[in-house]
Image (cartoon, rainbow, N blue to C red):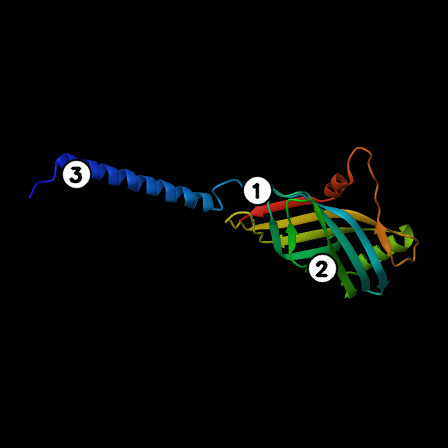
Amino acid sequence: MEATDPSNRGNICVLLVVVAFVVIITVGGIMIGLSPHSTPPPTKPEFGLNSLSVSSFNISGSQITAVWEVDFFSTKASDCWYYDNTVVSVFYQDRLLSETHPPRVEVSMVTESFTAYVVALAKGIEDPRVVNDIARDWSVSGVVAFTVRLFGASYVRCGGFRVIESVLIVTCPDIKVGFSDRSSSHGTMVVQHSPNITRDEEAVNRCSTWLDYY
């Protein structure tokens, strides 16, 4: 048998090393590209409050009955965001009045709104001072200020293979609702428009958006 030229064996080894190196680099690049931490997080959408209205509003003793219609606004997102386990809450000062769990919230690359209905049916308030303060604002000034909060856990970024989880908290404090008269059960948000900003900017300015990745 004719012996193999040592130089040929050396060339084959070098070729195998080069091929292996290219394969490792390619696979590594693909894995890094699919990693949720390989690129900076996408630009978060800003949330705002378009409107807040109250109907069937009544206070009897320590019981409050009301339906809050909350219309949120979100700016354009850099991708698709899905918020599960969402909770919309209504507070008077720091006292929780009621909350609801709306369906999954989707924010895509177009500006959009979504509405949540928060219902308090004969909700008992343990602190009599809170009840008295709400009743005073309602009957004396005809304006009651509420704080609205949106909580969402776990979003999925679509448009790729990456899944990123986060916690979202949107807080809209001191949103004043005016009632047509001092005994009316229906009220709408008191709005003071500014000529220098758009309605969308006004909506965002009413709230603060906090987003944390984990």
Residue at 84% x, 59% y: name it. 55
Mark number displayed over residue 99? 2
- Using the numbered discs, state the Cα–Cα distance from disc 3 to disc 2 in whole angstroms: 74 Å
| Relative to 60, residue 196 above or below | above
- Using the numbered discs, state the Cα–Cα distance from disc 1 to disc 2 in whole angstroms: 29 Å
Mark sitting earlier along the chain (1/2)? 1
Q: Position of residue 19 (x, y in %)?
A: 29, 40
Q: Front-most of 108 and 71?
A: 108
Crowding at mark 3 (Cα within 10 Å: few <14, some 14-19, many 20+): few
Q: Amino acid at mark 1?
A: Pro
Residue 59 sits in quarter: bottom right
| Relative to 180, residue 202 above or below | above
Mark 1 element type? loop
Q: Position of residue 7 (x, y in %)?
A: 15, 34
Identify residue for label 3: 9
Q: Is residue 211 visible?
A: yes
Identify residue for label 1: 42
State the quadrant of the N terminus. Answer: top left
